[in-house]
């Protein structure tokens, strides 16, 4: 059954009325378990660091947040490239969902970085290469989201947002390399292809953080993609209804 | 030594650790909740045949 209310179409059919599915429900439960394990190891079982003391525990949420923000940027740039190439709405919505979740994780990175900086460097913020380039990444993501939400036709805002989306991966590369290219307060990577600077339970806690945050990231992107899909359907329905209304007015008059 | 410094030495870095974890986990939870609520609201306006995951 379908009813018209306040310019929009409301359906009361028997289908599921959410963005969830069996897969996302299972994924959500596994994510919660992984986050629980992370809390156990990150806050209780892993030892304090010789130099940084308890502050090292911020690493277990800070480093995975930063990594997943880069993954989100990659997703957005890939989606933007495919959209500009093939005009695929599916990929455009993947880019949009990736950008919003990447912005969330970038915000986590910046704030936890500041909270880690205060006890280790003595200040919340310094305008050094890593912190400044990360802040630039946040601004780029907010710029993408602002352009994507412009009051314009879908094709116009999708194309403009995709062009901004192309800039994300080059900026991620600058953020990643900033500690190598310039002298900075920020430490060099804890994990690299040549090995890890931490061991034992600390390394295990960090890997648990990566797994838990990756699962959370996937869950969020899937749900955000579906919300974006629904938004576009509602917009299209609204536009169709408005056109039909105008046509009807034209016939009557 | 001022009261603030005494308090800082006594508590150490735990307040920063707690704030970081609370912010990240709380932020994730809040975002997830907002997304699910928006999804539920929008799902009512879209026919089930257009919800490909259902």
Image: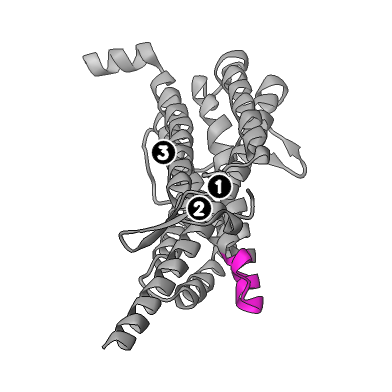
Q: Image point 63% across, 21% down: which residue?
A: A37
Q: CA distance from mark 1 to mark 3?
A: 29 Å
Of marks 1 and 3, the one in the foreground: 1
Report if the CB atoms under discs 1 and 2 are less than 8 Å apart.
yes
Measuring from the top left, give residue A24's x and y in whole percent. 63, 40
Q: Which residue is mark 3?
A: A114
Quadrant of image for the C terminus of chain A: bottom left
Measuring from the top left, give residue A230's x and y in whole percent. 50, 57
* Chain containing the residue with disc 3: A
Residue A210 can be seen, yes or no: no
Q: CA distance from mark 1 to mark 2?
A: 6 Å
Answer with the quarter of the image where residue A205 lies: top right
Residue A126 can be seen, yes or no: yes
* SS for callout 2: helix
Measuring from the top left, give residue A191's x and y in whole percent. 68, 39
* Chain containing the residue with disc 2: A
Q: Image point 59% across, 22% down: which residue?
A: A36
Q: CA distance from mark 3 to mark 2?
A: 32 Å
In magenta, the rendered stretch is: A79-92
Circle 1 Cα neighbour tier, 10 Å, few/some/many (<14 / 14–19 / ≥20): many
């Amino acid at each position: 059954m379908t009813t018209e209310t306040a310019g929009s179409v409301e359906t009361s059919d028997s289908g599921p009325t959410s963005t969830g599915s069996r897969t996302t429900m299972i994924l959500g439960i596994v994510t919660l378990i992984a986050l629980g394990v992370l809390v156990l190891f990150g806050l209780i079982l892993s030892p304090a660091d010789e130099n940084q003391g308890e502050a090292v525990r911020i690493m277990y949420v800070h480093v995975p947040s930063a990594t997943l923000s880069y993954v989100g940027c990659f997703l957005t740039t890939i989606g933007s490239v495919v959209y500009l190439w093939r005009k695929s709405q599916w990929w455009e919505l993947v880019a949009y969902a990736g950008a919003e979740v990447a912005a969330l994780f970038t915000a986590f990175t910046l704030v936890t970085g500041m909270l880690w900086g205060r006890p280790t460097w003595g200040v919340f913020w310094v305008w050094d290469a890593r912190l400044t380039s990360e802040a630039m990444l946040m601004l780029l993501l907010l710029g993408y989201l602002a352009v994507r939400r412009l009051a314009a036709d879908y094709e116009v805002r999708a194309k403009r947002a995709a062009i901004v989306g192309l800039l994300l991966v080059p900026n991620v590369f600058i953020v990643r390399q900033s500690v190598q290219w310039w002298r900075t307060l920020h430490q060099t990577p804890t994990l690299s292809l040549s090995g890890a600077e931490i061991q034992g339970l600390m390394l295990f806690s960090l890997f648990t953080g990566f797994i838990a945050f990756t699962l959370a990231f996937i869950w969020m992107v899937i749900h955000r993609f579906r919300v974006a899909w629904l938004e576009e359907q509602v917009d299209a329905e609204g536009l169709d209804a408005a056109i039909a209304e105008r046509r009807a007015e034209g016939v009557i008059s | 030594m001022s009261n603030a410094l005494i308090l800082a030495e006594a508590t150490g870095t735990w307040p920063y650790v707690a704030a970081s974890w609370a912010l990240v986990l709380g932020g994730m939870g809040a975002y997830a909740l907002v997304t699910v609520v928006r999804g539920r609201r929008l799902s009512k306006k879209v026919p089930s045949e257009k919800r490909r995951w259902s």
